[in-house]
């Protein structure tokens, strides 16, 4: 039916040099084992060890996308603040300064969106090679 649960009560003490430990740690971190003890147990008992493969271009792509997402969120927040300000305007004399400020913000927003589009296109060209 199910697996038998057995408590691990026996301890093996093992001394390693710094270099030996670093080598084991590097291989452990490259595996899918969450704990060092699990990784070492798999090595000792010659069980299957699944190694992770990190695609560096994907990592770089994800970092870039995170930055672009933050910029887009900031743009959206600025736009929402501008619209909220529009809704609180009581008279026409307040509207003219808001409109001038909004036009400047709009230019900044569209320039930033264009930068983001260009960066995404650059990433796509590199990615799709």
Image: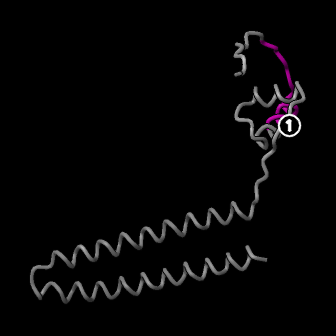
Q: Residue furthest right?
A: 46
User: What residue sits 52% from the left and 84% below the top?
Assistant: 114
User: What residue sits 84% from the left and 34% below the top?
Assistant: 24
8 vs 103, nearest the viewer: 8
Q: Position of residue 31 (x, y in %)?
A: 78, 41
- In the rendered image, the quadrant that contains the N terminus is top right
- In the rendered image, the quadrant that contains the C terminus is bottom right
User: What residue sits 87% from the left and 34% below the top?
Assistant: 19
User: What residue sits 34% from the left and 75% below the top?
Assistant: 79
Q: Position of residue 107 (x, y in %)?
A: 40, 87
Position of 39 relative to 129 (above/below):
above
The kind of secondary structure element at disc 1 is helix
107 vs 117, nearest the viewer: 117
Q: How is the image coloured?
A: one colour
Q: Is residue 16 magenta?
A: yes
Region of the chain picked out in magenta, as a range: 11-25
Q: Which residue is mark 1?
A: 23
Q: Is residue 30 left or right of residue 89?
A: right
């Amino acid at each position: 039916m199910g697996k038998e649960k057995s408590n691990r009560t026996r301890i093996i003490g093992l001394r390693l040099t710094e270099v030996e430990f670093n080598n084991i740690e590097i291989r452990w971190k490259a595996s899918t084992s969450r704990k060092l003890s699990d990784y070492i147990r798999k090595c000792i008992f010659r069980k299957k060890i699944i190694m992770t493969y990190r695609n560096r271009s994907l990592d770089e792509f994800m970092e870039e996308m995170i930055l672009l997402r933050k910029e887009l969120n900031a743009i959206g927040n600025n736009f929402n603040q501008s619209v909220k300000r529009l809704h609180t305007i009581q008279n026409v004399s307040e509207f003219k300064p808001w409109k001038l400020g909004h036009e400047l913000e709009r230019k900044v927003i569209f320039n930033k969106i264009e930068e983001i589009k260009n960066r995404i296109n650059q990433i796509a060209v590199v990615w799709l090679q």
